[in-house]
Structure formats: C-alpha cells, structure tokens
C-alpha cells in the first residue's frame, strides 16, 4: 500500500484512535477521515480514467473554439450567411456570453445537487446546441445557437474543475488540473484538421463544410456520455450534504481499485462536519467577499486578464491570417496545428513545477512572460517584420507560457475556497472575468482588424499584455501556497465543527 504522511486537518484528537471512518451523532455532525484517505492515495488507473473522462470535455471545448476561429473565413464566404468581420466577432462574443450565464446558473446547481448530475445536464445542452448550429440559417440563429453551446460548456467548467480538486490527491492536483485544462488544445488540433478537410472546396460546397464541422463536435460529444460513467460523485460533496454512508462506500471502492484494500481502520486524521442540505447565497456572498476577499481579488484578476488575452487572440487569429497575410480560409487549419502544440506542451511540461516550485512562483512567471512576449510580437507585427509563418511561431511560443497561466487561474479559484462554495466560486469568477475580458475581446479585435491598421491591432495586443503583467504582479504578492496541501487545510469547510 503506497500511503504517504498526511497533514492534520482538524484540531480534534480523535484521529489518534481507530474509530469508524464516519461517525455520526444526532445533531447531524459527522467525524470522517474521507479527505485524508483520498489524499493518501497514489496515482492509479482510477485517476487516469478520471483525467480521460474530464479531459475529453476540454477537447470538445477546444474543438468548438477552434472551429469558430477556423470557420470564420468560410462563414464570410457562405452564400447563406455572408458574415462580416463584425458578425464573426459578435457570434464569438455570444458564445462567451452563453458560457458566462451557463457557468453562473449551472455553478449554483452544482453546489446544490452535486457534480455528477450536472455532467449529464450540461453535456445534453452542449450536444443539442452544437447540432443546431449546423442548421443555422441566419446570423441571428447562428449567434443564438452559439450562445446555447457556450452555456453548456460554461456549466462544464464549474462541475469539472470542482471534481478535479475533490478526487485527485493533493500532491498531484496542480499538474492534473493544468493538463486536463490543457487538453483543450488536443481538441483545437482536431478542429484544425477537420477544418482543413471540410473547407476544401474540392470535397464540399462552401455552405456545407462548416455545417459538417459542427456536426463533428456533436458526434464526438456522444462518446462522453459513456466515459462519464467512470466518475463517481465527489465523496467530499456527499459527506457534507447528508450522505456520509454513500461517500464512505465510494471511497472504499476507490481504495480497493487503487491499493487492494481500504484504509477505514487506519489511525488517520479526521475532520468534524455539520451536514447541510445547501449553502444559502447570503453565506456564499459573505464567504467570497468578506472572509476571503483577498483571494477573490486574485481570482478575479487572473480570470479577467487571461480571458481577454486568450479570447481576443484566439477567436480572431484566423482573421489576422486572412486579412493581413493573405492566407486562404481553407488553409488556416494548418496554422492551428503548431499553435495547438505549443498550448498543450506548456501545461504538460511546466505543470509539475506548479506542484514543486509552487503556485505563487509559477503563476507570476507564466503570466509575466506571456505579457512581455505578446507586447514584443505585437510590435514586430505592427512594423510588418513577421510573415504568416513567423507570426504563428511567435504565437506558439507565447502560448506555451500562457496556456499553463490560463489553466492556473481555474486551479487557483477552485482550490482556495471552501467546498460548499467551490463550484459557484469558479462560476462567478469565470463569469465576471470572462464578461470583463472575454466577451468584449473578440468583438473589439474584430473591429480593430476591420480598420485594416496594424497599429490598431497592436494597440489591442498591448492592452492584453499589460493585463497579464499586472496579473503577474498581483499573483506574486497575494497568491496562496496551496501546493501539496489538502483542500481542507487551504480553505476550511464552512460546515467544519471544532
């Protein structure tokens, strides 16, 4: 049995005796070692299955966003839709607006009814809306269906990031979170290849290829329904919401699959909790904006800066290639492949450092380097010093650092707030951050590109760079050292009883 020393997460001395793993009294107070048991586990096939089942959602999101960017030229050439650059930016902003509202609504539900139920609700919304996008008949209908697609994906963000934190052992949590979020770019590469094939006029008519591209996303989503069966409900969520026996059974099953026996009778540190049905919104607001207001500021800044940085660049990079470098729209997909490679390799190769060097150091480093490199490449773009190929290489290098930075924003928000408000905290800061930085970005950059002025586009890049550098400074000063620590020691549950 590969168990490591654990950090005590309660002031109680009861962890020194071999009591039942879940003890309950008549006041709905339980004493449990479930968090410690989960953090004790070594990496196993169970954790790999969780990564695969959750990572494929980010693959879907990457597919969606890449298709939206790569298909922008085809939408402009469509005899039915005839998009302008502003229409492309507006539709992308509608997708992000849907993600914002979906995250808020589904985030609230995730904390009330559990992580697993939301997996299937949000996935159904995504699949239906994506298939409907393929049948769009006007700019308005396309924007509406993109809005609904975004709502489904936004809901996924909250449930999935909560689940990562609550199922993965503390010493692997940072790297796992970054790699799962980074799998977005596997979907981006798939979207790029799909766009190359489906936008080839030798194969498909101009108004058919982009429709088939969206149907590809819907078909891929069907696979997720099966994979989601691998993931249990979060035992941490269950133990607080009045179902400790079910939580205990799930942890027993996980331990049996990992080490071949249970830790139920080991002398492990325990935590005492008063079970609750839900957490009132008043308590949520008090927790986020009074008790943890400094952490809330950090989360908001990280989310907003990376949202503007990423969404403004990625949703409009195809327009830059076609309008400024003369790349045909059906060739844009080739430029996404190295772009996606840099984005995925960043979390994969740098992710371990978030668990070793620590959150504060790596978040400040990746945000700061991303901002400096964007400002430099933006200047070279403005003076015409870059070709389509060198511009793509510059983006690839920038996003090698920006990708783990963006994923670290989700990591920070999801591990530094109490379990009872975790999903809603992710939703709120994602929504506000994306609303500030993401919804405005694509429309703004679409308008800047429409001017035909490299200087105007450079001004947008410079603003995004300044946001990232400012976020790096705030992270260096205020980030929490959550690496290799149990969630309960980073943010004590609201239901905790001394």
Image: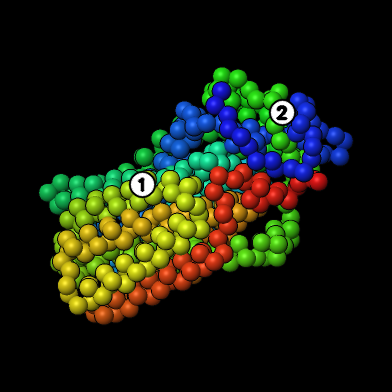
* Sequence-first tag of 2 and 1: 2
Q: Mark 2, residues whose alpha carbon is within 10 Å: few (<14), some, or many (≥20)?
A: some
Nearest to the observer: residue 434 or residue 132? 434
Identify the residue at image location x=62%, y=29%. Answer: 251
Q: CA distance from mark 2 to mark 1?
A: 37 Å
Left-right relation of 487 to 23: left
**Which circle, 2 or 1, is nearer the viewer?**
2
The quadrant in which residue 236 appears is top right
Identify the residue at image location x=43%, y=45%. Answer: 352
User: CB of mark 2 within 8 Å of CB of mark 1?
Assistant: no
On residue 159, the disc is: none
Q: Percent from the top left, x then y, of residue 356? A: 47, 47
On residue 267, the disc is: 2
Left-right relation of 243 to 364: right
Q: Which residue is mark 1?
A: 349
Q: Quadrant of the N terminus?
A: top right
Identify the residue at image location x=49%, y=47%. Answer: 355
Left-right relation of 96 to 191: right
Q: Is residue 416 visible?
A: yes
Q: Percent from the top left, x then y, of residue 224? A: 44, 37
Element carrying mark 2 = loop
Left-right relation of 253 to 410: right
Vertical position of residue 144 compared to residue 466: above or below:
above
Vertical position of residue 302 compared to residue 32: above or below:
below
Residue farthest top in this picture: 260
Vertical position of residue 154 compared to residue 325: above or below:
above
Element carrying mark 1 = helix
Q: Percent from the top left, x then y, of residue 479? A: 55, 60
């Amino acid at each position: 049995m590969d168990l490591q020393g654990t950090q005590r997460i309660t002031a109680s001395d009861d962890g020194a005796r071999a009591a039942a793993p879940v003890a309950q009294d008549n006041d709905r107070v339980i004493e449990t070692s479930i968090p410690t048991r989960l953090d004790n586990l070594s990496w196993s096939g169970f954790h790999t299955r969780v990564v695969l089942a959750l990572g494929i959602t980010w693959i879907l999101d990457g597919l969606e966003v890449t298709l939206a960017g790569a298909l922008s030229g085809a939408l402009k050439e469509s005899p039915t839709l005839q998009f302008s650059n502003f229409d492309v930016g507006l539709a992308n902003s509608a997708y992000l607006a849907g993600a914002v509202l979906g995250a808020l609504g589904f985030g609230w539900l995730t904390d009330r009814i559990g992580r697993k139920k939301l997996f299937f609700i949000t996935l159904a919304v995504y699949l239906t809306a994506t298939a409907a996008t393929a049948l769009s008949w006007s700019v308005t209908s396309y924007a509406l269906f993109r809005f609904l697609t975004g709502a489904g994906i936004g809901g996924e963000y909250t449930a999935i990031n909560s689940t990562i934190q609550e199922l993965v052992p503390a010493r692997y949590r940072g790297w796992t979170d970054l790699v799962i979020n980074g799998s977005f770019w596997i979907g981006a590469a798939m979207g790029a290849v799909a766009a190359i094939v489906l936008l080839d006029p030798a194969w498909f008519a101009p108004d058919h290829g982009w429709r088939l591209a969206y149907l590809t996303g819907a078909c891929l989503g069907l696979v997720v329904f099966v994979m989601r069966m691998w993931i249990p409900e979060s035992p941490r969520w269950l133990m607080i919401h009045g179902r400790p026996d079910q939580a205990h059974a799930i942890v027993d099953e996980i331990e049996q699959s990992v080490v071949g026996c249970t830790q139920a009778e080991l002398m492990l540190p325990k935590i005492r909790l008063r079970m609750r049905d839900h957490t009132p919104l008043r308590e949520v607001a008090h927790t986020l904006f009074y008790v943890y207001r400094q952490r809330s500021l950090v989360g908001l800044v990280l989310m907003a800066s990376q949202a503007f940085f990423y969404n403004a660049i990625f949703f409009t990079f195809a327009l830059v290639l076609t309008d400024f470098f003369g790349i045909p729209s059906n060739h844009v997909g080739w430029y996404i492949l190295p772009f996606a490679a840099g984005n995925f390799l960043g979390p994969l190769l740098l992710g371990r450092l978030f668990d070793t060097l620590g959150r504060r150091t790596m978040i400040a480093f990746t945000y700061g380097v991303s901002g400096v490199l964007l400002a430099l490449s933006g200047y070279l773009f403005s003076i015409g010093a870059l070709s389509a190929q060198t511009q793509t290489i510059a983006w690839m290098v920038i996003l090698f650092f920006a990708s783990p930075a963006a994923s670290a924003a989700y990591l920070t928000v999801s591990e530094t707030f109490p379990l009872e408000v975790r999903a809603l905290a992710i939703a709120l800061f994602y929504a506000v951050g994306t609303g500030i930085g993401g919804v405005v970005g694509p429309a703004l950059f679409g308008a800047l590109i429409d001017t035909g002025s490299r200087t105007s586009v450079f001004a947008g890049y410079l603003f995004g760079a300044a946001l990232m550098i400012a976020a790096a400074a705030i992270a260096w000063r205020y980030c929490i050292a959550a690496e290799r620590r149990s969630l309960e020691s980073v943010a004590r549950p609201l239901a905790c009883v001394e």
